[in-house]
Image (cartoon, rainbow, N blue to C red):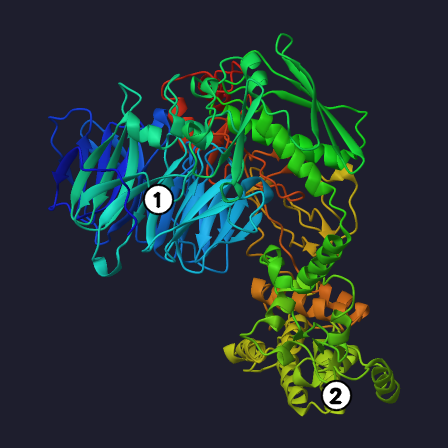
Amino acid sequence: MIMATRWSSEYTVAEHRDLQASAMAVDCTGTYVLLAGRRYFGLKNLIDQTDSLKKLTRNSKFDVTNAEWSPHTHQKELFAITSNQKVEVHTLHESGLNKLLSLSAHTRVVSSLNWNQFDANLIASCSIDTFTYIWDLRDPKRPAMSLSNVAGANQVRWNKQSKFLLATAHGGDVKLWDQRKGTAPVQYITAHLSNIHCLDWNPYNENQLATSSQDCSVKFFDTANPKRAESVLDAVAPVWRARYTPFGNGILMVVVPPMRRGENSLLLWNLANQTAPVHTFVGHNDIVLEFEWRKRPDSMDYQLITWSKDQTLRIWQIEPFLQKLCGIENGNEVSLENVNHNDGLLPTAPIVNSVESTVLVDGCSHRLEMGESVSDCSTPPPAATSALPKSLHQEFSLINIHIRNVTFDLLDPIKRKCTVTAATNGSVVIVYVSFPPGYPQNVAPVFQIAPSSTIDSALKAKLLKVLRQTAQQRVKKNRSCLEPCIRQMSEALDEAFRTDDSDQAQFVQIQGALLQHPSLYSFRDAYIPFPRTSGAKFCNVGMLVCFGRSSNASSSLRSDKTTPRSLSALNNYSESPLTVPSYYFNERGQARPRINRSISKLSQKGSKTSVMVYDAAGLFPMRKDLAQKYVFDSHNVVHMCQKNSQVARSLGRKDLSQVWSLAAQVAAQATCDEDEENDWEGHPVSLGIIHSLINHYVSEYDVQTAAMLCCAFGNKVVHPSPVPFSQKTAKTTNVSPGGSPYHTIHQVDSSVESLNLFSVKQNRSNSWSESMDDFRVDDIVIHSPLNTESEKPIKVCLANSPVYEHYKIAYSEILHHWYLLDARAQVMKYVNCKPEVHQGLEPVAECSSCKQKSRECHCSTCKIPTIFCIICHIPVKGAANSCLVCGHGGHLQHIAQWFTSNTVCPTGCGCQCVTENTDSQDV
């Protein structure tokens, strides 16, 4: 193992073997350290050295895999842990710990969690169930956002500079997500060949990401250009943890020695010099499970807190000299080593490309080779080692004016501005730079490109982005940025104007190869459904529709055009060594010309379509020819059954012919005269036979026969003529001729097309106190007025069961698909749809988008929430309460909690909601 020349032992050691803790976390204030295990929570005050560890019982059969405190000071008492498939949020109070929330959605063990650095209510969790969930603690019932991937996730980390970005690790790959851009990843990085154990974002640069893996390496990526790692740290063992230091430009690494035989040390690296670690923390006897940084509140010093499998908690003091080893500058005291590495006087360049640097002091240029210190130069520049540039005048005097293709036209420290001209390949770029008064103390200069510059607008935007990003990275560390910005702009300008023929040809060739190899960009299609290459589906008219890939599909996919996005995943599978290409594409005969042969095949066999339609009506019990010849006769059911029996026999359905003959006998016995003696009409079997026949054919999926029997022994719906609006009052004493002398409620509306068939029987009542609210249509049976001498009433009649109504509606839909509209209209005359009677008051919300009124929680038109809680501002999905006067409301629990101590509406409208609603109820 690589060891540093400097090493130190622990500052404080505490052994807690009885806890058997598997996770450790330090709160954001550095006051408490949490040790979490299967049976106990351990809590220790780090400020009070006399405070002993508090052991709190935790009753669970699952170990704690992760623990993390809230990074926000106003919620410093909250921490979250992961146990099996759940994320638990606990709160610390004077009497102990209290379980606040339990977040359950994962179906496998939760592998990682992380608090958002900007929003105290957001927690991200990931699991090997392939899902990464973003939780909002204000609505813990379900995840606020779900991010899905093909492979399970073992690490998740929020960006420390952007509130919307987060990274997840899936095996050896990394995916970047943006909350604002949906549930698809915005970037894909192939980082390692083995599992990634740790992710960490640079606290000063939102584009810098570090990954540590089982392949014994730590890689650093620029997410703006993630094709290859910027630098790699190699270790002799798998790297368990690697995180940036909160000071300087360092990283701390924890390795797992093979077979647990080796040093269980923590290695501190300076990223400006990756040849060897600058410090080693030695002391643990087993694998270090977790480490965290703690800033001492009384000084600028830091402490390193570690927890190991040896069940010891160790605290290491980070002295100023250790911070200095990581590149941090302490006041005006700058060592020669820091000047050589990166002291703000030298331009920033990628570590892997940093071969030589230049320092210009008092007009004398001194070139420093890699590994050479300033003291090795023949004429050491004394001004360079005194201090960083304290003023803009000093920065201008130290700047290197010999940058290729760059000219400094104006350097005015009094007016705090400068002008720079860059010329490349005949194009000229003029940049105006102005320095605000607070520069460089976390205040970046302002860059403007002159309109007279001879470059297009796209390149201008790119150069401005490079300048601003470089400046922002420097001023965050309170360092001067003019020369690094100009160098980065010069490199970007040179890269944009490369016109070498060989390079251009090679670029075109590589670009074509990339387009032909979709595996390099098919990750964007991960959430587009895999294209169906074949399939079959039955439609409602008895047709079977089949589709498949045509015989010339392989030739069409090899055209010069780019493969469609929805087929890129198919191409990826076809070229994978783990699949059989012939399963996806027809590769035969590639060596010979195929155009003539394909044309001849088409001419001989005719044009082959990829969609084929088969008539599968014989496989279904329903037949269109029966529906065309079936008759409806509500006045003479016996004749209807006999006629339909003849129709079924003529079409070869002897079974249906017998059914209709039996139905005719039942109808004939049911319509006999009352004075005739017949034991059959009063027998319960007569009606039971019809029910049995209907249930039998429903079990055989013959909706046609079941619906026809329902129509035959049902009752035809009577649709009254439209009544003028003046006569449509609920309470009226007008009685129609031949009607009832009692108070009568007539039908309100009927519509065959929309299936809103409100057909009701005239309801007699001796009480005038009945109203429309008390009227029920559930138990009403419709009977057609068939009391004539030539037509006898049916005594065996089916009640309007909702199930039978569904059979009729289903059969009418089938007739509609068959274009038998007359037969459908006949069936719909027997359908009785009952209206939903609305009672009482019901709030109606207006959609803020389409202005449509809706009684539901979501707008039926644009599908967005219509009711928002006025307290938590989250859409209301369950029980809600609103004021009848001002209309404001929200979650029932939130409203009740508010009005326990307040009487005025929480929106500030001034409404006395409790008083006003009480008065309204009294009225």
- Across and down, in percent, residue 580 comes to 59, 79
For marks 1 and 2, the one nearer the N-term is: 1
Q: Hey, which residue is sitting farthest front in the picture?
A: 378
Q: Secondary structure at mark 1?
A: loop
Residue designated by label 2: 646
x then y, percent, for residue 785: 71, 63
276 or 163, which lies in front? Answer: 276
Question: Measuring 37% from the left and 29% from the top, which residue is drawn there?
Answer: 247
Q: Amino acid at mark 2?
A: Gln
The front one of 807 and 449 is 449
- The percent position of residue 744, horizontal first and vertical second, equals 65, 46
The answer to whether marks 1 and 2 mark residues whose Cβ atoms lie closer than 8 Å is no
The picture quadrant where one finds residue 571 is bottom right
Residue under the point 66% across and 86% down: 656
Residue reaching furthest to the right: 603
Calculate the distance from the C-alpha at mark 1 to the C-alpha at mark 2.
99 Å
Say left or right for 500 vs 247.
right
Disc 2 element: helix
Residue at 65% in and 70% down: 532
Task: Say which residue label 1 marks.
Answer: 276
Q: Is residue 381 at all visible to an observer of this figure?
A: yes
Against 141, residue 625 (above or below) is below
Quadrant of the rendered image containing residue 122: top left
- Camera-side residue of 812 and 143: 143
